[in-house]
């Protein structure tokens, strides 16, 4: 893969993180939407998305292995 290209999974994670960021920031009062707060929310949205996707994939793969063994 060439430098700068994004995998499909990375693209999905980024899209979900952006949507999560939008949802979270919509609940922040306008007067509290500072650049620093938004950076923190953005980082948290990306970390949370990555965590959820990794946990999903881990559990999905575990379930698939269990089914394969039957």
Image (cartoon, rainbow, N blue to C red):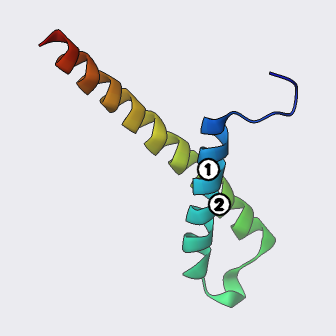
Which badge, 2 or 1, comes first in the chain's sequence? 2
Residue 16 lies left or right of residue 4; in this view the side is left
Residue 15 image-quadrant placement: bottom right
Give above or below for 4 relative to 19: above
For the residue pair 46 and 60, the one nearer the viewer reads as 60
Q: Residue at x 38, y 38 (%)?
A: 56
Residue 25 is situated, as x and y percent measured from the top left of the image, at 61, 75
In what quadrant of the picture does the C terminus appear?
Answer: top left
Q: Residue at x 61, y 87 (%)?
A: 29
Residue 27 lies left or right of residue 31; in this view the side is left
Q: Which residue is mark 1?
A: 46
Q: Secondary structure at mark 1?
A: helix
Q: Residues within 10 Å of mark 2 (few under 14, many from 20)?
A: some
Q: Which residue is mark 2?
A: 18
Residue 11 image-quadrant placement: top right
Residue 48 is situated, as x and y percent measured from the top left of the image, at 51, 49
Q: Secondary structure at mark 2?
A: helix
Residues at marks 2 and 1, CA–CA distance in whole angstroms: 8 Å
């Amino acid at each position: 893969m060439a430098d700068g290209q994004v995998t499909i999974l990375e693209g999905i994670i980024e899209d979900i993180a952006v949507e999560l960021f939008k949802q979270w920031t919509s609940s922040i009062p306008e007067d509290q939407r500072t650049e620093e707060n938004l950076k923190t929310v953005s980082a948290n949205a990306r970390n949370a998305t990555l965590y959820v996707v990794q946990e999903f994939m881990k559990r999905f793969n575990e379930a698939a292995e269990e089914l394969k063994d039957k």
